[in-house]
Image: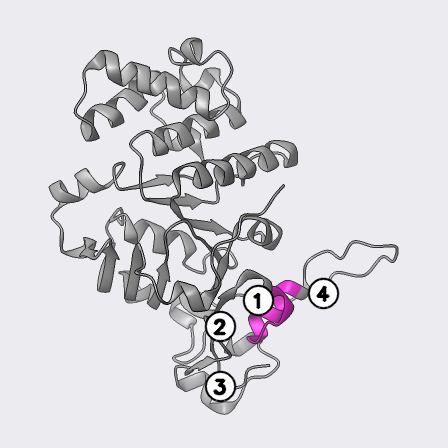
Amino acid sequence: MTQTHSDPSDELQTREPIVSVRHLETTFSTKLGPFRAVNNISYDIYRGETLGIVGESGCGKSVTSFSLMQLIESPGRVSGGQVFLRNRDLLKLSEKEMESVRGGEMAMIFQEPMTALNPVLTIGQQIDEQVLRHKKCSQKEAKARSIEMLSLVGIPSPADRYNAYPHQLSGGMRQRAMIAMALSCDPVFLIADEPTTALDVTIQAQILELIQNLQEKFHMSVQFITHDLGVISEVSDRVLVMYGGQMCETADTQELFNNPRHPYTAALISSRPQFGSKVHRLQTIEGSVPAPHELPKGCPFFNRCPRALAECQHERPPIVNFGPGHDVACFNPL
């Protein structure tokens, strides 16, 4: 698979970001009290760029994406921050205004298409609905656009598949249909939330290549969510590493893998299988992720970190810069 590359970090800083997230906080109310699933996250995504967000399950990756789309349901709520899409703060929009943005300027590919697609409507009806909502066109034109998109994402016999129900398609075909729906109205920003998790390796590679090819064709900005570092290394221009709802490290993809500075990032990279002639025991990260109400006030990785200092438990780590676009939240970086 060929990786696409955006401009270097120093050039990116001279351009306006398509997406700008500032101090985003998302809070959930529980019987044990409120907890922040997303805790003061900030980042930018530029035109044509892919930002990969990576971390263990429960670290806040998907909640971040749902917060951007304003799809957080009770008992959760976006409790602070700003989310700018082309200089417009989405968190200040009404639900009706957001409905014109979702599926139009920004779209999302969900992790499991069987739960995201409506089982009682055909694939064509669902894409038509999206097109009719966001583009001024007739039903006939919407159908033509839907079939065109099904063809574009590599679905065979698209005119026939247009009339198929989700359960009549394979997992890979359903995911392709989801991608067709997401791109049907030419979004400038696409969120892909672990779009290959439930697929086998061969189909996964096809879907990743498809997303990259379509991104290049439409010059979209992409936020790619995954727990798989191998996938991140293939598709991302830059990476943001999350743990316990907070940002640990962000850097250019190559820089992150070659020169990780946060102990958690380094541990994640070291735990990947190493291919070669020798068989190595996989490295593990000692301990387990604390329950949300047990997270320390300071660094969420404190109880598992081999480099932890006393202040790590009680104080939020400072952001340390190691060069253009390479920021680390740590008292004792590598």
Q: Earlier in the sequence, mark 4 or mark 3?
A: 4
Q: Could you tell which of marks 1 and 2 lies nearer the N-terminus?
A: 1
Closest to the camera, between mark 4 and mark 2, is 2
Q: How far is disc 2 from disc 3 in space, using C-alphas?
A: 15 Å
**Of residues 140 and 204, the one drawn nearer to the viewer in this rendering:** 140
Which of disc 3 and disc 2 is earlier in sequence? 2
> Which quadrant would the C terminus be assigned to in this image?
bottom right
Give the residue at mark 2. Answer: 326
Location of mark 3 (residue): 331
Question: Which of pointers 4 and 1 lies earlier in the amino acid sequence?
Answer: 1
Mark 2 Cα within 10 Å, few/some/many (few <14, many 20+)? many
Q: Which residue is mark 4?
A: 283
Could you tell me the amino acid type at mark 2?
His
From the image, give the main secondary structure of the stretch colored magenta: helix
Please name the amino acid that badge 1 sits on. Leu
Residue at 29 percent of width and 52 percent of height:
68
- Circle 1: element type: helix
| Residue identified by numbered label 1 | 256
Along the polypeptide, which appears first: circle 4 or circle 2? 4
Q: Amino acid at mark 3?
A: Phe
